[in-house]
């Protein structure tokens, strides 16, 4: 029975997927094949766009600009649909000043979350009534303790929906990782390779594939695709490098790409709150709602946790049976327009190809892409639930490491030299075990704990030059309610050492 071009390509795509996962040891519980002519590109922005792709529930996915479902866009849309009382109170108190603060944030993104209060003070001194500014500063501090409030302020600083959303890895770092990655080989015979993908994370779904074996004019090549499928084919591919590039949205600090600095924009705790709270306490009434993102047909069911990139490609394809005389000339021309699985066009992007017929009438095609032109083979996908669980685990580990540093005598917590108008002053701040235990007694998650540490340290760093030696000073917060006690314990020239001695 003759199969259609689409049926033939669905089967071949599944066979290729199985060959890749088995022979390159890619996890079928996570791997998704990327379909298309997908060069990695030469800029960090191009790399981040690929990392930002949300995988569909299929073992393969067509990657074209029109098919992108962006993780960062989904995250930004969620932030516009959720709310927290503390964040709302800050915006309400700011009133007509809020748009100006938003514009300032976009133009002057703080280097870290703990730097937001100082950035606000700098802006407010020139733009607001001092009394209102002080009230708003307290409300901003409260908002920054809440993950949703953190995320909304960071999203503004990163340019809202219009800004470039950076990831941890730059194109230079990715290039180094690819250049040191190992080799790989894959062979496939369409007559014997299994097309069963029910064992995969997508449970047999093969939706994102091209219906033609050849690039260019899809419909005109259907006959040739069917002819090649009926003949059967064998494929041998060698890769000079097969690299796994971890994907991590930028959560803290900044990243440089060329001359441009990009700020952090992602707070996993905010997404975790939105995901776990299908209610009107967190979500605003209306649409899009929780189901729009996380329901059965939601737009954020998965996330990319790694790109699989190959470089230095050599591929030989041989038909298992002869090609009829009537199809030979047109088939050779079709191969020059690009073909499965990479669809690289001869003479473009480092691709070159040759085709001929052997004495038995079988077509033999050699396709190469020189090293230095990496291609995206696919991604490792994870459910949004597992993505958030992994982020929470990393956050807990980081918090434990910071807590250990804070509790160790002589270890400085977040040392920050601060320049003052009166004189050059370097302040280092350390927390005692007693103060740290008081912080833990609040029962807050790790991220808000670290934010409070940053706020107290910033207060100490900015004011220690005015404190006498061994005289306790207090920092009082209203929400959450706490009092931090600190004092200068050593003065060495213009440098001062501060200990946070108590926290209640």
Image (cartoon, helix red, strand yellow):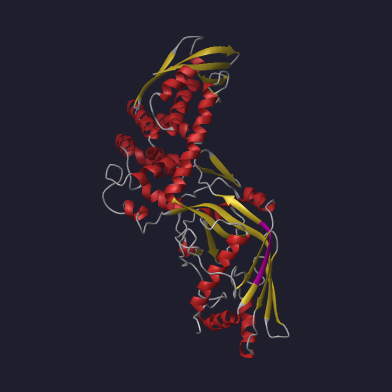
Where is the C terminus found, in terms of image quarters? top left
Viewer-proximal residue, 213 or 89?
213
Residue placed at 53% from the left, 26% from the top? 404
- On the question of residue 359 being in view, the answer is yes
Q: Is residue 346 above or below residue 70?
A: below
Viewer-proximal residue, 128 or 187?
187
Give the image location of residue 24, x and y in percent. Answer: 62, 59
Q: Quadrant of residue 321?
A: bottom right
> Is 282 displayed left or right of 400 in the figure?
left
Q: Is residue 239 magenta?
A: yes
Q: Is residue 329 above or below residue 98?
A: below
Give the image location of residue 480, x and y in percent. Answer: 35, 27
Q: Is residue 224 above or below residue 411?
A: below
- On the question of residue 413 being in view, the answer is no
Viewer-proximal residue, 95 or 324?
324
Give the image location of residue 307, x and y in percent. Answer: 56, 54
In this rendering, the count of numbered labels is 0
Q: Is residue 423 magenta?
A: no
Q: Is residue 307 above or below residue 443?
A: below
- From which residue to which does the magenta span run? 235-241
Residue placed at 53% from the left, 74% from the top? 9
């Amino acid at each position: 029975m003759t199969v259609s071009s689409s049926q033939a390509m669905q089967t071949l795509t599944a066979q290729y997927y199985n060959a890749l996962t088995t022979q390159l040891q890619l996890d079928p519980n996570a791997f998704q094949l990327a379909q298309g002519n997908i060069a990695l590109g030469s800029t960090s922005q191009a790399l981040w766009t690929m990392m930002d792709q949300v995988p569909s529930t299929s073992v393969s996915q067509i990657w074209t600009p029109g098919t992108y479902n962006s993780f960062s866009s989904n995250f930004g849309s969620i932030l516009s649909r959720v709310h927290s009382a503390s964040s709302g109170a800050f915006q309400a108190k700011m009133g007509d000043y809020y748009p100006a603060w938003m514009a300032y944030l976009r133009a002057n993104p703080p280097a870290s979350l703990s730097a937001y209060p100082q950035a606000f003070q700098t802006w407010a001194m020139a733009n607001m009534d001092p009394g209102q500014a002080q009230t708003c500063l307290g409300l901003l501090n409260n908002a920054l303790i809440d993950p949703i409030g953190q995320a909304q302020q960071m999203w503004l600083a990163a340019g809202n929906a219009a800004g470039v959303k950076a990831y941890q890895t730059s194109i230079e770092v990715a290039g180094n990782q690819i250049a040191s990655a190992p080799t790989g080989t894959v062979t496939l015979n369409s007559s014997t390779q299994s097309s069963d993908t029910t064992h995969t994370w997508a449970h047999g779904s093969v939706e994102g594939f091209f219906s033609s074996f050849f690039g260019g004019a899809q419909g005109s090549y259907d006959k040739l695709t069917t002819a090649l499928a009926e003949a059967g084919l064998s494929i041998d591919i060698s890769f000079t490098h097969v690299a796994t590039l971890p994907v991590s949205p930028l959560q803290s600090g900044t990243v440089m790409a060329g001359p441009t600095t990009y700020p952090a924009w992602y707070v996993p705790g905010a997404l975790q709150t939105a995901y776990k709270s299908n209610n009107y306490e967190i979500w605003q009434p209306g649409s899009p709602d929780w189901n729009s993102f996380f329901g059965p047909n939601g737009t954020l069911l998965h996330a990319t946790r790694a790109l699989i990139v190959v470089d230095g490609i050599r591929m030989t394809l041989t038909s298992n049976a002869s090609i009829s005389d009537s199809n030979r000339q047109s088939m050779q021309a079709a191969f020059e327009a690009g073909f499965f699985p990479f669809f690289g066009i001869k003479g473009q992007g480092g691709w070159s190809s040759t085709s001929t017929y052997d004495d038995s009438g079988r077509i033999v095609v050699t396709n190469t892409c020189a090293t230095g032109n990496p291609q995206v083979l696919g991604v490792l996908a994870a459910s949004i639930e597992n993505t958030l669980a992994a982020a929470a685990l990393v956050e807990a580990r980081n918090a434990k490491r910071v807590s250990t540093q804070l509790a160790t005598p002589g270890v400085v917590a977040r040392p920050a030299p601060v320049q003052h108008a009166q004189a050059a002053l370097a302040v280092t701040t350390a927390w005692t075990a007693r103060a740290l235990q008081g912080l833990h007694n609040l029962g807050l998650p790790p991220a808000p704990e670290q934010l409070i540490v940053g706020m107290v340290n910033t207060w100490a760093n900015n004011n220690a030059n005015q404190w006498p030696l061994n005289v306790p000073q207090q920092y009082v917060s209203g929400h959450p309610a706490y009092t931090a006690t600190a004092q200068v314990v050593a003065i060495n020239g213009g440098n001062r050492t501060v200990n946070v001695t108590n926290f209640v």
